[in-house]
Image (cartoon, helix red, strand yellow):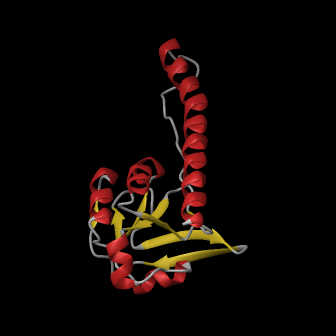
Amino acid sequence: MGGVVCASPAYLREHGMPDHPGDLERHICVQLANAVFPAEQWVFQGDDRIYSVDIGHMGFSVNMPEALAPAVAAGLGIGLLPISTALPELRSGRAIRLLAGYVPQPVNVYVLYQSRRFLEKKVRAWVDRLRGDIPEILQHYIGELRVLDSASERV
């Protein structure tokens, strides 16, 4: 999972709810400025298609998700938050998940090390732990997101 698209209730009252990734081009989008996501573009998969959305008119960008979450919660725009950063905002009601039927661009995690041949045991142990922990943690987050989604559908 590449992230969760979120906005504050106040932002949505003022600007309306996007129903489709293309609707984001008419909204203020705030973005993480990093090498993971293409600048000024969000990519989604859904309806058996890939959607590339130009968010070049974004309000601003930050380089840390911990800075983006409060901006989204304050109503400064729609943000694509990492799931771990989005969940506290969604749980508290400071943010609402948008476009749940569309999957944002996935993010891969890589571990770089000098050589397998001379790999220290502590590095191997750390890599093995990451291989086990990251998928497990991510599945936990996705499960919690599904619970929050189903609770909001009942409201």
Residue situated furthest front in the rendering = 155
Task: Decide which of 146, 151 is in the foreground and name it.
Answer: 151
Q: Position of residue 39 (x, y in %)?
A: 39, 69
Q: Position of residue 93 (x, y in %)?
A: 39, 59
Q: Nearer the viewer, residue 6 or 39?
A: 6
* x and y, in percent, of residue 62 in the image: 27, 60
**Residue 77, image quadrant:** bottom left
Left or right: 53 as drawn, with respect to 31: right
The reply, left or right, for residue 22 in relation to residue 28 is right
Q: Is 53 situated left or right of 153 in this image?
A: left
Q: Taking 113 as reference, is 72 left or right? A: left
Tell me if residue 26 comes above or below residue 11 in the rendering: below
Q: How many marks?
A: 0
State the residue lying farthest toward the top: 121
Q: Is residue 97 above or below residue 147?
A: below
Residue located at (34% from left, 79% from top)? 28
Q: Residue furthest right?
A: 48
Q: Nearer the viewer, residue 17 or 23?
A: 17
Residue for point 48% across, 14% down? 122
Work out which quarter of the rendered image holds the C terminus and state it: bottom right
Question: Is residue 56 visible to us here?
Answer: no
Q: Residue at x 54, y 78 (%)?
A: 21
Q: Position of residue 52 (x, y in %)?
A: 54, 76
